[in-house]
Each structure stands twice: as structure tokens, then as C-alpha cells.
Amino acid sequence: MLTASPRPSPVTPTIDLSAQGVQHGHLRLPYSRDDSAWGSVMIPICVVANGSGPTALLTGANHGDEYEGPAALFELARVLDPAEVSGRVIIVPALNYPAFRAGTRTSPIDKGNLNRSFPGRPDGSVTEKIADYVTRHLVPLADIVLDFHSGGKTLDFLPYAAAHELPDKAQEARCFAAVAAFSAPYSMKMLEIDAVGMFDTTVEEMGKVFVTTELGGAGTASARSIGIARRGAANLLKHAGILAGAPETTPTRWLDMPSSDCFAFAGEDGLIAFERDLGEPVRAGEMIARLYPVGRTGLAPAEYRAAMDGVLAARHVPGLIKAGDCLSVLAVLTEAP
Ligand SMILES: [Zn+2]
């Protein structure tokens, strides 16, 4: 059988990913453009390694407008002492670096949504080249992968770490054990609207332990959510045996997204008036939000009612919404998986 061998990645790391000690450098991705004919995208990367042991890959800003991951990971890269490490920690605080610098979910270069671009292409767009490098050169090094997310500029979430239901139940159990070790205030068995092209799916299909998060959103990060991210990353490294000691756990509330009834989408443009705040319970048939037409007074609002019992796990931000936008996500309190 003839199979074309894949092209090599155009990305070059400026550090040796297998060296011992602390290294700070870049993933250099050639990007020829008007203001730099032979220019590059320079994605910051840090590797902290000491002796033998597992490898963790920690990533932030897969979406460029989500800030808990970068805030936790730029700090961790600054302070992590190789003498405390058994194994290796690969830290990429801002994976979709062009999007992160622009403060946007997707890349300003190619409009690429990195978390819909996996496994990527070595001969694709800038965003697809980042995904390809991560898939073929970083994930294979890792035993455990933590990818930080939050709601960005258009969603706000209860702070949770999450994993997915997987066909390999032993792998699924390892992922949920890692979610429990992260010890966010909430822990989610997460249902995806659109799993194709996600980093999550690619890493899970490679058999790795994968943890994702949604730690807030609304285009910023709070002292509380950054604290959850920092402690969660340290807890995961302890859980993996890369840092010494037991994870510092606090009680977490487990949530499940049992069906697509969790999601509500706006059917029209308008002004949202929520009747519930994040974390508050709502029963099937009760009002989640009213959506007011804003062109004139005297018009009745559209009513958005819960399709199931649950708690409000995510909501749209800011106050205006467009038809098709995700208005709310409900989740069900449950036992630990
Ligand atoms: Zn995200």
C-alpha cells in the first residue's frame, strides 16, 4: 500500500524539549506577511525537567480570550523549580498565540478556532499548523494533558474541571480521577456540542489522561478563578507524581450534562434578562431568562424556560444576544463518577 508520508511540521522549538533543568523559549512558526517577509509567530514555551518520571503538558489560551490558563501558567513557568520535579512539565501558556495577543477567541491571521482545528495540518493555515505540531510533537511526549478554558467574551461558567465519557472505561476513570485531583469547586462530566476538531478529542483518542476546565469567563479572570487554576495545575502535577505530596483537595460538587436539553440557544436578537444566576437551581418549565426585543417599547419578551431540572452552569454575556447564540447551559448535580 502506498501512503504519502506526512510533511514535516514547519514549527521549530528554540529549546531542546528533552533537556534537563529549566528552559524558556519559543515554538517558532514561519509566517510570511506584509510587515515581515520572513517573519515568524513566536509561541512561548517552557520545559522543566528533572530525572525520570511522567510528562505533563499544560496549555492555556487555546482560545485567545480566556485568561485563567495564561495567568496560572506564566506564573508556574516562572516559579517551578526543577529540584521539585520528578519527570517533565511542558508549559505553553498561550497556545493560540496570535489569538491571545489579539484578545480574541479565534486567530486574527486566519480566523482559525484552534479548538476546532485538531488534529491539524502541516501544510494548512497558521492555526492548523499549531494544531499539527501539538498533535504530532507535544502530545506524544505527554502522559497527562491539562488544557485550560473559560467562557471567553461571550459565556460565563461556574468554575469546573471536566472530562468526557470515553469508550475506554479505564481511560475514562483515569481522566475523572485527575479531574477530582484538580479539585475545582465543581467537576463536570461534559457533553460537547461539537467535538470534531477539538484538542480534547485528539488527546483522548491518543489514549492520554486529559483534563479540561471552564473556570469563569466574561472576557476576564478573577482573583478567585486564577487561584482555582493555579491550585488545580499544582494538584494535577501532584496527582501525576511529578510534584511531591498529595493534592490539596476541597469538596467539589459533581455535575453531569445528560443530554442536549442542557443547552438553550437564542431564537432571536435581543436583550437578555436572566431570572437565575450561575449555580442557582431551576426546575423544568421554570424561567431561565426573558429576551426583550429592543427596537421599540411595548413588545412582549420571548421566554426561555428550562427543558430539564438542573443548575445554571453557564450563561451568555454580555447583555445583548443574537439569534443562534448559546443563551444558557444547565447541568445536573450528581454523584462522583
Ligand atoms: Zn475555550
Image: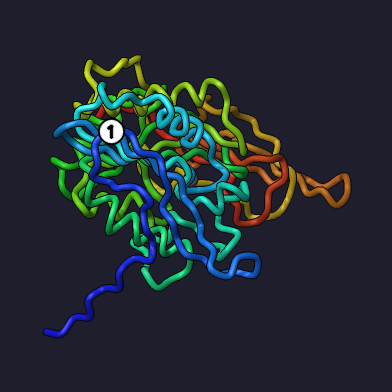
| Residue 124, placed above or below residue 285 | below
Give the residue drawn at x 62%, y 50%. 102
Q: Position of residue 45 (x, y in %)?
A: 40, 44
Q: Nearer the viewer, residue 195 or 144?
A: 144
**Visible residue check, residue 213:** yes
**Visible residue check, residue 283:** no
| Residue 238, placed above or below residue 270 | above
Q: Position of residue 251 (x, y in %)?
A: 34, 15
Give the residue drawn at x 46%, y 28%. 75
Q: Quadrant of the C terminus?
A: top left
Q: Nearer the viewer, residue 274 or 24?
A: 24
Where disc 1 sits, the SS reads strand
Kind of residue at disc 1 = Gly
Give the residue drawn at x 64%, y 30%. 275
Give the residue drawn at x 34%, y 65%. 9
Q: Nearer the viewer, residue 173 or 219?
A: 219
| Residue 7, placed above or below residue 98 | below
Q: Quadrant of residue 174?
A: top left
Q: CB at mark 1 closer than 8 A to ligand 1?
A: no
Q: Quadrant of the N terminus?
A: bottom left
Q: Which residue is identified by label 1? A: 21
Q: Nearer the viewer, residue 23 or 215?
A: 23
